[in-house]
Image (cartoon, helix red, strand yellow):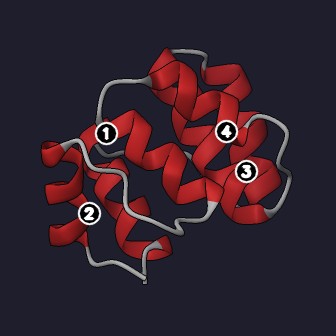
Amino acid sequence: MMDIINFKQSVIDQHLPDNLPSYLKALWYDGTGDWKTAHDLIDQLTDPRSAHIHAYLHRKEGDIWNADYWYKRAGKKRPEVSLEKEWEMLVKEYGQ
């Protein structure tokens, strides 16, 4: 897929890479500051990856109860790292 360096550069360049799955598109839009589009892309998806991204987005929004619900759906626990670090971890995990 795409490594973290190229993914971050595409965000800086504001150039959405072709053929990204919805969960990575959501991270891309979030990286550009467009939380609403990121959430709209992921909101109706229920697979574990999408649930994990959904959890992160609600954590970022400050809706911790909803975030924890989605972390549980993803089989994950809310991390004790910054939002920026979690975003990078998600891109690294799911961008490979």
Q: Amino acid at mark 2?
A: Phe
**Mark 2 → mark 3, Cα distance in angstroms:** 21 Å
What is the quadrant of the N terminus in the image? bottom left
**Mark 1 → mark 4, Cα distance in angstroms:** 14 Å
Tell me the element at label 2.
helix
In the figure, 42 relative to 93: above or below? above
Q: Which residue corresponds to mark 1?
A: 31
Image coordinates of residue 91 in percent, x first then y, are 38, 63
Q: Which residue corresponds to mark 2?
A: 7
Image coordinates of residue 5 in percent, x first then y, are 15, 69
Q: Amino acid at mark 3?
A: Ala
Q: Which residue corresponds to mark 3?
A: 51
Mark closest to the chain's N terminus, 1 or 4? 1
95 and 58: which one is in front? 95
- Contact between labelled residues 2 and 1, with CB atoms less than 8 Å apart: yes
Near mark 2 (Cα within 10 A), the count class, few <14, some 14-19 or many ≥20, is many
What is the quadrant of the C terminus in the image? bottom left
